Image (cartoon, grey):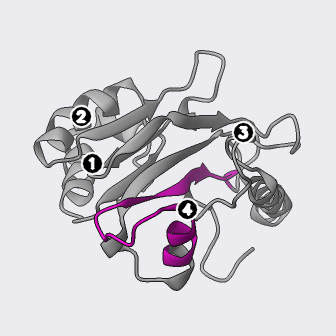
């Protein structure tokens, strides 16, 4: 969910956004455009609602202010697995980093055979309480605007190849190169595309 970095300063918008986030019922929430203000607004309520595992990435002063991201989770995050990936040196026009991390999910929450098969081959027991680590990528792909913030009728079309390249770069990335290579399980976030684009 893109919370909009400026919306944190607007009480009406802020209230609606916080209500939407915290009433979602999701076990894991991925946010884009967070900042220090959003973290302060969300952290206390998130923890109170059992999102006890949180991580916020704030843009540096030299970064674009909409480049923050966060994960709020009721399930354990492997903090050592968190990576903030900057594809701007590989994809011309890429502006926001990607957050990648591992989350431990109890096996009984997973209903697809690929997860169960992968987890059973790496564990000694079929106990449903043994968690499975899944890798999640929180993306904020290039918005359909020019770097100066302007937009014209053809800007979405001209920036679409950047979003596609960012997606391809992420698909080729393997978190934690020292471990056995496995793909990212879930890619979610702000794709900046319509339902039938890309």
Between the residue at mark 3 and the residue at mark 2, the CA separation in whole angstroms equals 26 Å
Q: Which residue was labeled with disc 4?
A: 122
Taking 72 as reference, is 65 left or right? Answer: right
Nearer mark to the viewer, of 3 and 1: 3
**Dot 1 and dot 2 residues touching (CB under 8 Å):** no
Question: Residue 59, position in %: x, y?
Answer: 55, 25
Q: Which residue was labeled with disc 3?
A: 95
Between the residue at mark 4 and the residue at mark 1, the CA separation in whole angstroms equals 45 Å
Q: Residue furthest left?
A: 48
**Dot 3 and dot 1 residues touching (CB under 8 Å):** no
Q: At numbered mark 4, what does the secondary structure look like: helix, strand or loop?
A: helix
Lower position in the chain sequence, tag 2 or tag 4: 2
The quadrant of the rendering that contains the N terminus is bottom left
Q: Which residue was labeled with disc 2?
A: 43
Q: Which residue was labeled with disc 1?
A: 13
Lower position in the chain sequence, tag 3 or tag 1: 1
Nearer mark to the viewer, of 4 and 3: 4
Between the residue at mark 2 and the residue at mark 4, the CA separation in whole angstroms equals 34 Å
Q: Quadrant of residue 67?
A: top right
As drawn, 171 above or below 100: below
Q: Residue shown at 24%/65% (left/top)? A: 24
Give neighbour class at mark 4: few <14, some 14-19, many 20+ (Cα, 10 Å): few
Residue 119 drawn in magenta: yes
Lower position in the chain sequence, tag 3 or tag 2: 2
Between the residue at mark 1 and the residue at mark 2, the CA separation in whole angstroms equals 18 Å
């Amino acid at each position: 969910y893109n919370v909009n970095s400026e919306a944190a300063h607007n009480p009406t918008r802020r209230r609606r956004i916080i209500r939407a986030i915290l009433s979602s019922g999701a076990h894991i929430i991925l946010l884009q455009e967070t900042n220090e203000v959003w973290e302060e607004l969300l952290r206390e309520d998130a923890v109170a609602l059992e999102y006890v595992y949180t991580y916020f990435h704030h843009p540096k002063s030299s970064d674009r202010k909409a480049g923050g991201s966060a994960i709020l989770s009721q399930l354990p995050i492997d903090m050592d697995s968190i990576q903030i990936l900057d594809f701007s040196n590989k994809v011309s026009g890429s502006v926001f980093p990607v957050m990648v991390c591992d989350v431990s999910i109890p096996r009984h929450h997973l209903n697809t055979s690929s997860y169960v098969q992968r987890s059973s081959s790496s564990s000694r027991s079929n106990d449903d309480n043994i968690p499975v680590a899944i890798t999640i990528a929180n993306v904020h792909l290039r918005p359909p605007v020019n770097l100066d913030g302007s937009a014209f009728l053809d800007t979405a079309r001209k920036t679409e190849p950047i979003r596609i390249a960012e997606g391809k770069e992420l698909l080729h990335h393997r978190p934690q190169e020292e471990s056995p290579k496995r793909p990212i399980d879930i890619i979610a976030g702000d794709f900046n595309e319509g339902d039938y684009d890309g």
